[in-house]
């Protein structure tokens, strides 16, 4: 598979300017920030962003919100990130850890708000986020023990702030 088939005009804007700041989920850049203490490195995305000569700003909303690495998985019991932002759904720890059922909503909201603030301060127009994440998912996000249509909490907040958000993997 070539770069052009992995990232086409629908997932890579043609108007990026050299030096322009863009947000990218840290785990997509190879940083160990996922809930399970791993990463989801996408070399094709990094290569395209480097070719575009943009300023890559790594972000992990969950870590910004104060959650550790690794951390127990957490997700809304229903809905997507917009529902969490609107107070219609919490974010709860899931799985079989001692923290199961604990409310992680405040950490998710705090991280999302910090990411939006970074975007606004830096004039960010575009972000690439980790698909399926309850924070960073773009088209789908973990919710209710499966995948829900719609963004995670941070991606929803970025969208509301006017940032165009792309999935970092296809």
Image (cartoon, rainbow, N blue to C red):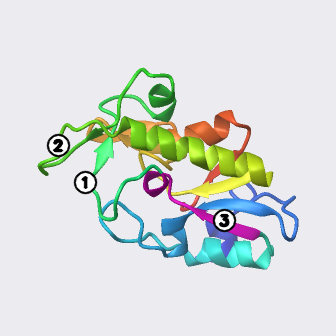
What is the x, y in percent for residue 111? Answer: 50, 47
> Number of labelled discs?
3
- Indicate the secondary structure of the residue bearing disc 3: strand
Q: Quadrant of residue 108?
A: top left
Depth check, front residue: 110 or 159: 110
Which circle's residue, 3 or 2, is located before the other in the chain? 3
Position of 51 with respect to 59 (left or right) is right
Label pair 1/2, CB-CB below 8 angstroms? yes
Residue pictured at 45% horizontal, 49% vertical: 65
Q: Residue at x 66, y 33 (%)?
A: 160
Mark pair 1, 3: CA separation: 25 Å
In-front residue for pair 132/119: 119
Instruction: Measure the C-alpha gap from mark 3 to mark 2.
Output: 32 Å
User: x and y percent of residue 154 in the render?
Assistant: 54, 44
For label 2, the residue is 100
Residue 57 tag number: 3
Callout 1 crowding tier (Cα within 10 Å): few <14, some 14–19, many ≥20: some
Where residue 170 appears, x then y in whole percent? Answer: 54, 60
Which residue has dot 1 on it?
A: 72
Assess disc 2: are there few (<14), some (14-19) or many (≥20) residues with their C-alpha within 10 Å of its C-alpha. Answer: some
Counting other residues with Cα less than 10 Å from the Cα at mark 3, is it few (<14), some (14-19), or many (20 or more)? some
Q: Nearer the viewer, residue 10 or 45?
A: 45
The tag earlier along the polypeptide, 1 or 2, is 1
Q: Secondary structure at mark 2?
A: loop
Is residue 157 shown to the viewer in this render?
yes
Quarter of the image where the N terminus is located: bottom right
Q: Which residues are magenta?
A: 55-64
Q: Are marks 1 and 3 in contact (CB under 8 Å)?
A: no
Q: Quadrant of residue 38?
A: bottom left
Q: Is residue 9 left or right of residue 30?
A: right
Q: Position of residue 115 (x, y in %)?
A: 60, 49
């Amino acid at each position: 598979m070539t770069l052009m088939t992995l990232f086409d005009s629908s997932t890579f804007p043609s108007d990026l300017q050299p030096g322009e700041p863009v947000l990218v989920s840290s785990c997509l850049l190879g940083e160990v920030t996922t809930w399970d203490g791993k990463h989801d490195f996408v070399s094709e995305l990094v290569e395209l962003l480097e070719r575009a000569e943009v300023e890559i700003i790594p972000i992990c909303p969950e870590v910004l919100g104060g959650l550790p690495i690794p951390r127990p998985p957490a997700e809304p019991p229903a809905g997507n990130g917009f529902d969490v932002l609107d107070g219609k759904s919490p974010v709860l720890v899931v799985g079989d850890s001692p923290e199961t059922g604990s409310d992680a909503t405040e950490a998710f909201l705090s991280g999302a708000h910090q990411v939006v603030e970074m975007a606004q301060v830096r004039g960010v127009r575009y972000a690439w986020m980790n698909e399926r994440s309850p924070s960073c998912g773009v088209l789908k996000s973990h919710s209710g023990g499966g995948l829900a249509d719609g963004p995670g909490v941070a991606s929803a907040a970025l969208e509301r702030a006017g940032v165009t958000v792309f999935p970092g993997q296809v």
